[in-house]
Amino acid sequence: MNDLLAKAGGGTDQTEALPFPSLDVLHKACGAIPRTRDMTAALERFFLDVKDPVKFVLDPLTQPLSWALRNAIDVMQSLPWWAAILILVAVAQFAGRRVGVTVFVLASFLVLAFIDHFGYAMQTLAIILVCTVICVLFGVPIGIAMSRSDRMERWLTPFLDMLQTLPTFVYLIPLIFLFSITEPKLYGIAIILYAIVPSIRLTNLGIRLVDRDVLEAADAFGMTSRQKLYRVELPLALPNIMAGINQTIMLSLSMVVIASLVSAPGLGTLVLRGINKLELGVGLVAGLGIVLLAVILDRVSRAALQRVNKMHQPRA
Amino acid sequence: MVARAKAGMHKKDMLKDHGHVLGLRDINVEIKKGEITVIMGLSGSGKSTLIRHLNRLIDPTAGEVIVNGTDIMKLDRAQLLQLRRTQMSMVFQKFALLPHETVLKNTGMACSVRGEDRVKTDETARKWLARIGLAGAEQMYPHQLSGGMQQRVGLARALTSNSELMLMDEAYSALDPLIRSSMQDLLLELQKDLQKTVVFITHDLDEALKLADHLVILKDGEIVQQGEPQNILLNPADPYIEDFVSDINRARVLRVRSVMETTGTDDDGYEVLEGDENLEQAILRSGGAADKAFAVHSEGKRVGTLRMTDVLKALVPSAARNPTAF
């Protein structure tokens, strides 16, 4: 028994004696081999080197985003409270056509206003609105392109996977290098990169799932590919696309809280204050406000989705 | 592979030895204007592939498809679209209607694809919907209709396109027997007025015999026999077809004119029977008497004589093919 134990112990000893040939270990043996910290430093240096040319290109391209975010926030905040609530309730009714949901939206906003969180909620909502519109504007066409080409799907999928699994804070790091922290586009880009993924994926999926028989009929009657897209593929994929938009909205909301680290206004700043100053009450109430906002956005977009689904009910 | 197929390699050998599936080989069918050509075969015989070659939803590996004198294999994309829009329409087994558009819009699909005036399209669509018995359903959605009604919409869609050639791919196979039968009657009735050129695919021999002016029987991607259905029934070309037609109610399918003798043009005092009537009618009229004979008329003229002995022989497949067996 002792022998066996000694043998087992000996085994672990041996692995310690033979270290894994990592960069740091190899550096000890030969100074020409860089250490791990040299590698990360090199990555940082590389990033600093390319920063200026990248910024030169990206800055003007993303300027409209800053403009849109700034204006949206301004407009939402400058509206008198009753007008803002009226518009929001009207939008909820138009999109969902469900009285219960609309009443819930009205009650939620009244509660938010009553506890003096209405302004913050409006800022958050403005950011989500702008980012979602941009996500749909880019995500749907990218999804269509992806559904057309298997090769594009193969190349884009790992990239989309990465965007979704990368820890949300990591988005912010390179962006902080690129743009000034006072600019709204900094958090705008982070939110869009994170939230655009479901729009792309579900548009792609929706179009790929369109009934082969219906597509064949479209071909047999001589539809051009454009006619097929607008008359068959997009309408039949609409339930999936709407589900993607619902997901996009929810992801923007979750990202907008983290984006408050880089000066995104709204309810997230209150949560951040709660964490930084250990103001438990402030953080909790703001957090619950975000939940309320999430429920509103989810219910309204889901009601809209169900309305579309009803029209698309498969044959009985 | 094309060369091997042309050399006559069998489908099974080709799949086994080379991993290629032989779809169709040596298909020469003349589809006559204004007739219903029925292409019949069991599953895997290549009938759906064949009908898709006609509008190039599937391109054949080799060969020609000649429509009104032009080889459509030589058309470019734009010309092909034009051909599909104007000269052909198609009815599908699974209806393939647009689920988000109303019955009216679905019916007018071919016209709206061609970019025709909306008001006029709706008017034409309404007319055809009324013709096939769906007036009043214009504003409904396909999922609100039963299978039979959906296929009526499919048929109306094909008719509204006003194309000369109608391709029907197992159009009635998904319907239940009663509805199928009424849809067959509808097609025959429409055909009397419209005289479209119809290519009808089916795996159901009864349906094929009921509809066909010209019947093509496919097996393993090759034509086993083609011709007038009555003729195929009376003279099956090989044991496969003989086997195939053995379950048919011959008295109901065979017509008097196919069994009669073309002699006896003068009036010999027999009772008159129409040439298009089936043998069941003849047996009924004879009252079971095997020695009776009828004068067969077609369009008011005497065309032949029907002897009940011939009728009885025609009812037994092997006797019909080989009359000396009796």
Image (cartoon, rainbow, N blue to C red):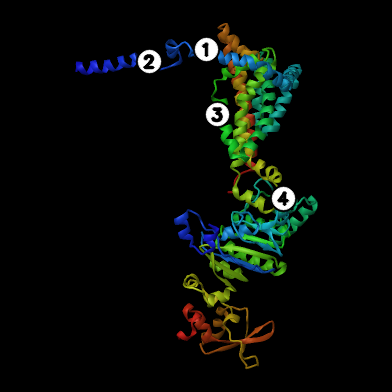
- The residue carrying mark 4 is B105
Q: Indicate left or right for A280 with B122 as reference.
A: left
In-front residue for pair A280/A204: A204
What residue sits right under mark 1 in the picture? A38
In the displayed structure, B19 sits above or below A16; it is below
Q: Nearer the viewer, residue B18 or A291?
A: B18
> Which one is in front, B59 or B164?
B59
Residue under disc 2 on the same chain as residue under disc 3: yes
* Amino acid on which disc 3 is placed: Asp
Asked if badge 3 and badge 1 are on a common chain, one would say yes
Q: Chain of mark 4?
A: B
What's under tag 1, amino acid-wise? Asp
Work out whether A31 lies above or below B26.
above
Residue type, numbered disc 4: Lys
Front in this rendered view, residue A104 or B290: B290
Instruction: Kindly report the distance in space between the C-alpha atoms of the residues bearing marks 4 and 3.
Output: 41 Å
Q: Nearer the viewer's eye, disc 2 or disc 3?
A: 2
* Residue A271 as seen in the image, left or right of residue A180: left
Asked whether, in this view, residue B15 is left or right of residue B201, the answer is left
Query: Could you tell me the amino acid type at mark 2?
Result: Pro
Q: Is residue A162 positioned above or below A55 on the image?
A: below
Q: What residue is disc 2 on?
A: A19
Q: Chain of mark 1?
A: A
- Residues at circles 1 and 2 in contact by the CB criterion of under 8 Å: no
Q: Give the mark, 2 or 3, whose residue is nearer the N terminus.
A: 2
Q: CA distance from mark 1 to mark 4?
A: 67 Å
Task: Tell me whether the residue at label 2 lies in contact with that at label 3, contact meaning CB atoms closer than 8 angstroms.
Answer: no
Subunit ID for the residue under disc 2: A
Q: Which residue is mark 3?
A: A161
Q: What residue lies at 50% left-to-right and 83% top-to-bottom?
A: B312
